[in-house]
């Protein structure tokens, strides 16, 4: 299976889309009429240094992402099995899924960028090599109460967003060991509680448009799951002030197909690098769990002679069927809601809390995602408290 993923704000650069504007002149002309300026000039020359300003960045990225998608489809003749986009990029995923046309999407993005750019006195920073639970604890211990977790980009990269003074103060408390702190060049505290006014205004504007249900599954930033019927008008405004669940979105796709092919559509390779990091983390988790399980299964007693029969005399273990795993997942979800407290049989993980419904992972594992741990546990390894 294959997923197309579209980048968002932060991937822009002067010169992006150079080979595309002349290839799709009609769409470029429509964009210029909607925006009131030359999108080609903004992206290729940026004479007034506006490309990094949110209200210009978002329409520019949306346009380049859209032209890149049309070019990919025109060239290859193939469409993806799944779609996802990082923040602004989700609009391109929904465009590709047939939820609205190019013009409607650009109008939505233009308004979104304008509203988000009006929010001042906020800042954002990326925290590297620290977990969600650790970040939340450090923020609480240092009384940084006006900071939210904005982006779960990968298990080792989380973005915080909030009041400018508290983001500045966070630099010193997140500079230890392998933990790194990177201030981001943004004009506001995006994807945080400080965007609620922009969210509400955008919701009012978004109701002017008609939307179709996705023709290709689109993973929502808000839920990290495919859009359900009727969710679009709810999730798009909510996305402005809620956490971007990017890492969980990729994990969801990998749970559908462990060999999922990801192709970044647009400028740069920011998302390609994040996906590679998420895959490495999943592999390490699997290795660690396998080692822990092997350790638990190691028998300390001598093997009795009666247990040393010829292998041919022993019945072969039945392969776990996909249907049985699906039933196990259904049974768990029917009985245990998200947020259930559990304990694990693995040492060191006695107190956990689920942060998702159980899913069929890699076609043969019944697993559930754990809050704070940033990883999946097999249902056979845990017990509800």
Image: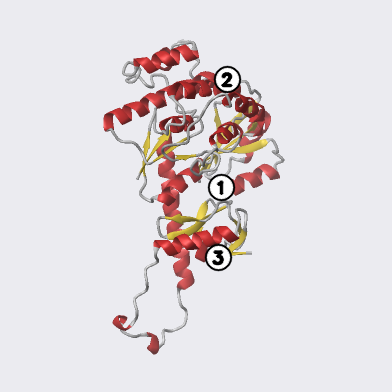
Q: Is residue 316 visible?
A: yes
**Percent x, y of residue 262:** 37, 40
Residue that mark 1 sits on: 131
Residue at left offset 41%, top offset 27%: 65
**Percent x, y of residue 249:** 48, 43
- Whether residue 186 sits left or right of residue 301 in the image: it is right
Work out how far the residue at label 2 is from the one at label 1, CA to CA, in angstroms.
33 Å
Residue that mark 3 sits on: 347
Residue at left offset 52%, top offset 27%: 210
Residue that mark 2 sits on: 114
Identify the mark nearer the N-term, 3 or 2: 2
SS label for mark 2: helix
Work out how far the residue at label 1 is from the one at label 3, CA to CA, in angstroms.
19 Å
SS label for mark 1: loop
Which scheme is used to colour this image of the protein? Answer: secondary structure
SS label for mark 3: loop
Identify the mark nearer the N-term, 1 or 3: 1
> Is the N terminus in the top left, top right, bottom left or bottom right quadrant?
top left
Q: Is residue 39 visible?
A: no
């Amino acid at each position: 299976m294959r997923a197309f993923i579209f980048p968002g704000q932060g991937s822009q650069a002067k010169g992006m889309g150079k080979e595309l504007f002349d290839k799709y002149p009609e769409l470029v002309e429509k964009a210029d009429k909607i925006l009131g300026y030359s999108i080609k000039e903004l992206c290729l020359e940026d004479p007034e240094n506006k490309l990094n300003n949110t209200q210009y960045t978002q329409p520019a990225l949306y346009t380049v992402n859209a032209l890149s998608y049309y070019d990919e489809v025109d060239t290859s003749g193939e469409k993806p099995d799944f779609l996802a986009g990082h923040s602004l990029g989700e609009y391109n995923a929904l465009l590709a899924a047939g939820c609205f046309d190019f013009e409607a999407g650009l109008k939505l993005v233009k308004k979104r960028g304008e509203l988000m750019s009006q929010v001042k006195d906020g800042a954002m920073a990326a925290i590297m090599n620290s977990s969600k639970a650790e970040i939340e604890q450090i923020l609480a211990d240092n009384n940084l109460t006006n900071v939210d977790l904005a982006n779960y980009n990968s298990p080792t990269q989380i973005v915080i967003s909030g009041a400018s003074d508290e983001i500045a103060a966070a630099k010193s408390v997140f500079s230890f060991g392998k933990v790194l702190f990177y201030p981001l060049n943004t004009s506001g505290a995006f994807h945080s509680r400080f965007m609620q006014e922009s969210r509400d205004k955008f919701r009012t504007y978004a109701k002017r448009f008609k939307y179709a249900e996705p023709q290709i599954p689109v993973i929502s930033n808000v839920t990290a799951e495919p859009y359900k019927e009727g969710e679009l008008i709810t999730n798009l405004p909510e996305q402005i002030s809620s956490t971007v669940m990017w890492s969980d979105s990729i994990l969801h796709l990998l749970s559908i197909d462990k060999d999922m092919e990801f192709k970044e559509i647009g400028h740069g390779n920011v998302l390609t690098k994040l996906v590679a990091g998420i895959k490495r983390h999943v592999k390490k988790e699997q290795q660690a769990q396998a080692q822990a399980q092997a350790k638990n299964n190691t028998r300390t007693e001598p093997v009795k002679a009666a247990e040393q029969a010829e292998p041919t005399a022993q019945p072969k273990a039945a392969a776990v069927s996909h249907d049985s795993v699906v039933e196990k997942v259904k049974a768990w979800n029917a009985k245990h809601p998200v947020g259930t407290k559990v304990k694990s049989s693995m040492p060191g993980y006695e107190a956990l809390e689920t942060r998702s419904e159980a899913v069929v992972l890699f076609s043969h594992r019944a697993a559930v995602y754990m809050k704070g741990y940033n990883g999946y546990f097999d249902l056979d390894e845990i017990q509800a408290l």
